[in-house]
Image (cartoon, grey):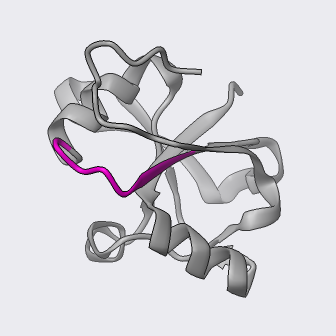
Amino acid sequence: METIYKICSRAEWASAVATAEYVGSADDARDGFIHFSFVHQLAGTAAKYFAGRTDLVLIAIDPTPLGGALKLEPSRGGELFPHLYGPLPTRFALRVHALPWDCTAHEWP
């Protein structure tokens, strides 16, 4: 499976790094899983859920070690999105980048 991505606040990620696992945002907790996107889905995710925010990071995740806890499920427009049922060990982060808001011009990794 290709790399998956999570957009979250810098503070959420810093807290996750301090505890070695990311348990998700309030929206993730409400839905019962951690929401991720594939690279081609990032602009839509950013525009829909993070418009105007300047406190964000983009985390690239290696999905391989997540095993069966990671499911591909239909979401926006019936498209399959990766959902993680359980916490994300922060050691699986491949890269973390500050995410300035400009989803129309931003070149996604």
Residue 79 in sight from this viewpoint: no
Look at the magenta stretch and give its main secondary structure.
loop
- Front residue of 34 and 43: 43
Q: Residue at the bottom extreme?
A: 19
Q: Left of 106 or right of it: where is 66?
A: right
Residue at the image position 47 percent from the left and 73 percent from the top: 11
Q: Quadrant of the C terminus?
A: top right
- Front residue of 48 and 107: 107
Quadrant housing residue 45:
top left
Residue at the image position 40 percent from the left and 29 percent from the top: 80
Up-down relation of residue 73 to residue 84 (above or below): above
Residue at the image position 35 percent from the left and 67 percent from the top: 28
Residue at the image position 46 percent from the left and 61 percent from the top: 34
Q: Quadrant of the N terminus?
A: top right
Does the magenta run of residues contain 3? no
- Front residue of 64 and 19: 19
Q: Percent position (x, y) of residue 73?
A: 40, 40
Give the residues in magenta: 51-58
Does the magenta run of residues contain 53? yes
Q: Left of 66 or right of it: where is 16?
A: left
Residue 38 in sight from this viewpoint: yes
Quadrant housing residue 103:
top left
Q: Percent position (x, y) of residue 51?
A: 17, 41
- Front residue of 86 and 3: 3
Q: Left of 18 or right of it: where is 32?
A: left
Q: Percent position (x, y) of residue 78?
A: 24, 27
